Image: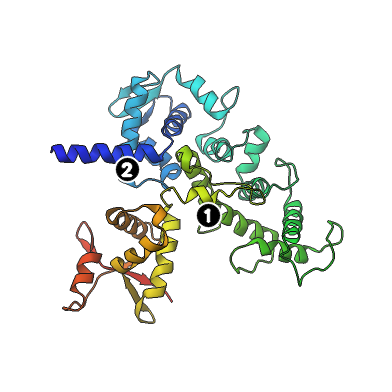
């Protein structure tokens, strides 16, 4: 029992070290301020705030963290219990929320707009003005703001248009010497076609993905800037939430892509997001998978050995690795399989790869052709 308690304390300390605990407390306070007048249950708080923390915490970690945060806020007199496992904010809560949101008065908006507008602005280190918040609520506006900031484009972040972004990115690609073979003379905004500008700007993409429209260009580049594995606005927001609640030592997710320092130098010190982790695992699995088309699989233990060499800065242990594999499987990001055929030649691999959950057991990661 004593050993178990010591392990729980150690895990909690590790969790607090990699997270911005005050930001997490502020988010819980905000959710209560914009919640029901009779208060919110701990279950509802856990559910509503999960999208903000899922990139850095497992469901069990989040349950533990939220419980501790609630205890802290009650002790500080900021919230009070009103019924079984339900809480309501006190009068001291609003001044702290105003300071966190960097506004003079609380916005008259539903929680989802505060979450996707004001909080995203804070994650981008921008003043959450009403004009900026309105832009951030749409997918196109979010990408426009993100790219203007990341690439330090010379446009007003509150009113920049896709056409301006396209030209600014094309000009940046030209300045970096990436456009040879496309254009030999310097470009101006009046003498370049949409197709040509998109072609030039797409040279800033690290992948070989071919884009043909402003929307596709902005979606792909925005995902690249934050390290997202897909181009959805939801994924962008989750990566930005991750920056907000990461500890200061690992929170530099967004940097000026055209500037001096790279945020990626710092982000590698933080635990990987689940999509980022999954993509790396699948990349390794594809290289070492065996079998026939439609049934290619890689041992979970074999992937683990290579992962340790490729991304040692993630500092995962094998238990955490297997937990993330299971979480990725449950989230539908990858598929696991059981070792149906076992003999003396693979018994050790099967044993080392085993992941158990309830009544199920897995040993392989399936690889799609």
Q: Is residue 156 left or right of residue 114?
A: right
Q: Which residue is outermost to the left?
A: 1
Q: Secondary structure at mark 2?
A: helix
Vertical position of residue 269 compared to residue 293: above or below = above
Q: Secondary structure at mark 1?
A: loop
Q: Measured from the top left, where is residue 176 in percent x and y?
A: 72, 60
Q: Is residue 56 visible?
A: yes
Read off the residue under disc 2: 61
Between disc 1 and disc 2, the foreground one is 1
Residue 266 is labelled as: none
Residue 227 is labelled as: 1
- The crowding category of the residue bearing disc 1, from other C-alpha atoms within 10 Å (few below 14, some 14 to 19, many at least 20), is some
Spatial separation of the CA atoms under disc 1 and disc 2: 23 Å
Q: Which of the pair 346/93 is nearer the observer? A: 346
Vertical position of residue 36 compared to residue 135: above or below = above
User: Which image quarter holds the C terminus?
Assistant: bottom left
Q: Measured from the top left, where is residue 220 in percent x and y?
A: 60, 59
Q: Is residue 234 visible?
A: no
Q: To which quarter of the image does residue 157 belong?
A: top right
Q: Is residue 326 left or right of residue 342?
A: right
């Amino acid at each position: 029992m004593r050993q178990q308690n010591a392990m729980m304390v150690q895990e909690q300390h590790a969790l607090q070290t990699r997270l911005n605990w005050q930001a997490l407390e502020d988010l819980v306070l905000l959710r209560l301020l914009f919640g029901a007048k009779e208060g919110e249950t701990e279950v509802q708080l856990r559910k509503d705030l999960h999208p903000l923390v899922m990139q850095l915490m497992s469901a069990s970690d989040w349950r533990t963290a939220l419980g501790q945060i609630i205890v802290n806020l009650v002790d500080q007199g900021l919230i009070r219990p009103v019924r079984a496992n339900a809480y309501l904010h006190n009068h001291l809560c609003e001044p702290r929320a105003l300071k966190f949101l960097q506004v003079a008065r609380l916005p008259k908006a539903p929680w989802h707009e505060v979450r996707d507008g004001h909080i995203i602005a804070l994650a981008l280190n921008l003043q959450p003005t009403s004009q900026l918040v309105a832009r951030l609520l749409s997918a196109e506006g979010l990408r426009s703001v993100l790219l203007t900031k990341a690439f330090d484009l010379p446009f007003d972040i509150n009113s920049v248009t896709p056409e301006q972004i396209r030209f600014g990115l094309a000009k940046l690609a030209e300045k970096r010497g990436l456009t040879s073979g496309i254009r030999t003379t310097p470009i101006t905004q009046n003498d370049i076609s949409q197709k040509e500008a998109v072609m030039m700007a797409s040279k800033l993409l690290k992948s070989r993905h071919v884009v043909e429209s402003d929307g596709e260009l902005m979606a792909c580049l925005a995902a690249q800037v934050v390290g997202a594995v897909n181009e959805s606005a939801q994924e962008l927001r989750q990566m930005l939430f991750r920056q907000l609640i990461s500890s200061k030592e690992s929170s530099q997710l967004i940097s000026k892509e055209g500037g001096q320092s790279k945020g990626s130098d710092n982000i590698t010190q933080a635990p990987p997001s689940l999509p980022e982790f999954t993509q790396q695992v699948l990349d390794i699995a594809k290289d070492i998978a065996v079998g026939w088309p439609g049934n290619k699989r890689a041992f979970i233990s074999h992937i683990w050995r290579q992962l340790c060499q490729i991304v040692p800065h993630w500092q995962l242990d094998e238990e955490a690795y297997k937990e993330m594999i299971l979480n990725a499987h449950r989230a539908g990001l990858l598929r696991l399989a059981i070792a149906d055929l076992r003999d003396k030649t693979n018994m050790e691999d099967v044993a080392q790869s085993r992941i158990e959950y309830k009544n199920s057991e897995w040993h392989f990661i399936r690889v799609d052709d």
